[in-house]
Amino acid sequence: MVIKCPECGHQVSDRARVCPSCGIDIAGKVTRCPDCGEYIFKDEHDCPNCHCPINVSAEVPVPVPVPQASQTDVVPVNREEPEAASVEEKPKNGHKGLWSALIVAFVLALILVFLGIYYYQKTQIQNEQRAYENAMMSREPAVLQNFLDMYIDASVAHRDSIKVHLEALKKIDRDWDNARISESKKTLQLFIERNPDNIHVREAQLLIDSLDFITAKIGNSLESFKKYMEEHEQGYYYDEAKMEYDKMEEEIRLARLKAQQDSIEAERLKAEADPAAPAN
């Protein structure tokens, strides 16, 4: 399939190894935005055209360990037992405060982790819902297939709806291929009647226009060109058909005029040859 290079915008095949214009890698490196349908690089964080998130990754905060300040307990040497007992109680209070700080830090870290997971899942659900709605409104099979490839964990209802819609679009594409290859005006008109909003309708109309002009040229008569102009007032070949029609009409007019002149001349010569003959 011919796509637009995400780097330089030139036309390039999606199977080409590199873009012939800018030299950037193409094969296996591009995908289609589920939101706007533009081709972008797979490693893009979001679509440069519509800014739809493409590769959303959870940024889960990592708990930062609380540094433990080294504490040197200096116990004064004192032979008096009451004062020694009071000094020994200080380390116990210090360890208790340290454990409290660690517990608080751990709880806060857990809260941040759960909040990160919650917002990540919420963002994923919102992105999936938006991509689903855009895909269902799209008439491009590639957009629907991209949704199925990107949202493997989407709900069964969403994936089934996308698959049904995708199969319907593929059938329309098959019908279009058959109509285009057939080069039959009747088949092309039937395709337009069944798919009035399809992107190939304009192309089908142009093909019908071309077929009718070819028929007019084969007929090569005032009637055939007149019929084309009546059916295709905005046709691509209208001006050419009008020129042929006018040319042919002028030739007929001149032929009739010459025939009249020849008839008059013949009558004149006849009258000169036989003056006694009655004039018509």
Image (spheres, grey):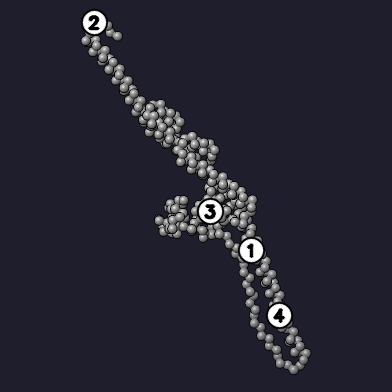
The circle drawn on residue 276 is 2
Find numbered disc 3 in the image and state the secondary structure of the residue it sits on.
loop
Report if the CB atoms under discs 3 and 4 are less than 8 Å apart: no
Find numbered disc 2 in the image and state the secondary structure of the residue it sits on.
loop
Q: CA distance from mark 1 to mark 4?
A: 31 Å
What residue is at 40 percent from the left and 56 percent from the top? 20
Tell me where residue 188 appears, x and y as whole percent. Answer: 49, 37
The circle drawn on residue 95 is 4
Q: Nearer the viewer, mark 2 or mark 3?
A: 2
What residue is at 73 percent from the left and 83 percent from the top? 90
First of labels 2, 4 by sequence position: 4
Give the residue number, with chain letter if any, for mark 1. Answer: 116
Q: Nearer the viewer, residue 220 or 61?
A: 220
First of labels 3, 1 by sequence position: 3
Q: Nearer the viewer, mark 1 or mark 2?
A: 2
Q: Where 89 sits versus 253, above or below?
A: below
Q: CA distance from mark 1 to mark 2?
A: 121 Å
Graded by Cα atoms within 10 Å as few (under 14), some (14 to 19) or many (20 or more), the crowding at tag 3 reads many
* Three-letter amino acid code of the residue under disc 4: His
Q: Nearer the viewer, mark 2 or mark 4?
A: 2
